[in-house]
């Protein structure tokens, strides 16, 4: 099988999940240019448009800081969310329904858990590399006020796992890719707009405010904002991390169950 031979050619220690991860890297090497705009240039343009453009009209800033500085951590978390969902929907769906890569991999010594772990590792790799580049660019704009900004990397990694795992389960069970577009329309876009990325959730009506608190994005935004601004988060750090970890744990169990149901006949 391809995934086995790739790992053998590079002479890495045999870790089955790594073979799946490396298989995805080979594909990324051919297609990375297509994702540059959506995963990197678009957030940078948003920084320029909202942070510097709209921010120029917000004289008092937000919470006592310049609007650009307040906005950037929200964009870090929302960019991680969008990259995660993008890499957890159509790529996973296609490997079940169109190119059927997962079925080929199960014919090799790989187990279902190996396939799932390798695919999750690749999504986290995409998130971390995207956000690392984003941090570099926003740092050049002087929008990172604290050296704790590097702590956003483990935060977005946990957010990526919390979102990718249940999205994998969703992409594995839907029958048409139209359902994937609906996920963006009714989940990703509302979260991006109302989970504290562009304005404080305290300005929302109470019912919508609690809906924002339920989303994993708000917890990541609060942690990222605390890190880049060097302030305390609204919730406790432990509370945020435990909530995101719960999403990741439940989502991983759902993904493993759905993958096994689809791949083991």
Image (cartoon, rainbow, N blue to C red):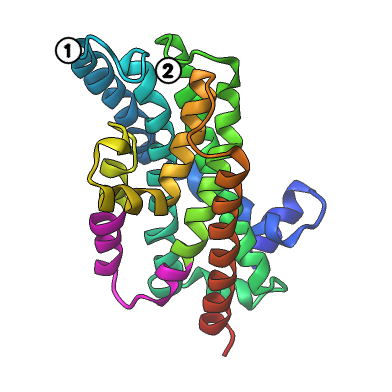
Question: Residue 209: horizontal and vertical position, in percent?
Answer: 31, 47
Magenta segment range? 169-187
Q: Is residue 16 left or right of residue 129?
A: right
Dot label at residue 138: 2
Q: Residue at x 54, y 19 (%)?
A: 230
State the predominant SS element of the stretch in magenta.
Answer: helix
Would you place residue 247 above or below residue 37 in this image? below
Q: Residue at x 44, y 72 (%)?
A: 172
Front residue of 187 and 67: 67
Q: Is residue 230 magenta?
A: no
- Tell which residue pokes out farthest to the bottom in this image: 265
Quarter of the image containing the C terminus?
A: bottom right
Front residue of 124 and 246: 246
**Labels 1, 2: front one:** 1
Question: Residue 81: horizontal and vertical position, in percent?
Answer: 41, 45
Front residue of 147 and 232: 232
Neighbours of disc 2 within 10 Å: few (<14), some (14-19), many (20+)? some
Neighbours of disc 1 within 10 Å: few (<14), some (14-19), many (20+)? few
Q: Is residue 253 left or right of residue 52?
A: right
Dot label at residue 57: 1
- Tell which residue pokes out farthest to the right in this image: 13
Badge 2 element:
helix
Q: Is residue 185 left or right of residue 113?
A: left
């Amino acid at each position: 099988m391809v995934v086995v031979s790739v790992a053998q050619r590079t002479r890495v220690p045999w870790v089955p999940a790594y073979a799946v991860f490396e298989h995805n890297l080979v594909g990324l090497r051919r297609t990375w240019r297509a994702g540059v705009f959506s995963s990197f240039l678009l957030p940078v343009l948003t920084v320029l448009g909202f942070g510097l453009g709209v921010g120029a009209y917000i004289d008092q800033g937000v919470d006592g800081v310049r609007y650009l500085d307040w906005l950037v951590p929200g964009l870090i978390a929302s960019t991680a969310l969008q990259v995660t969902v993008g890499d957890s929907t159509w790529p996973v769906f296609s490997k079940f329904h169109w190119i059927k890569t997962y079925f080929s991999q199960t014919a090799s010594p790989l187990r279902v858990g190996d396939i799932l772990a390798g695919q999750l590792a690749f999504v986290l790799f995409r998130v971390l590399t995207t956000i690392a580049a984003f941090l570099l660019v926003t740092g050049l704009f002087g929008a990172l006020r604290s050296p704790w900004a590097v702590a956003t990397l483990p935060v977005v990694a946990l957010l990526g796992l919390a979102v990718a795992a249940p999205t994998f389960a969703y992409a594995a069970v839907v029958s048409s890719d139209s359902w994937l577009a609906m996920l963006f329309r009714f989940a990703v876009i509302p979260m991006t707009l109302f989970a504290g990325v562009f304005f404080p959730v305290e300005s929302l009506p109470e019912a919508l405010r609690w809906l924002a608190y339920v989303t994993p994005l708000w917890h990541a935004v609060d942690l990222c904002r605390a890190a880049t601004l060097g302030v305390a988060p609204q919730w406790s750090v432990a509370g945020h991390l435990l909530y995101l970890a719960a999403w990741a744990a439940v989502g991983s169990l759902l993904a493993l169950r759905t993958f096994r149901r689809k791949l083991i006949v």
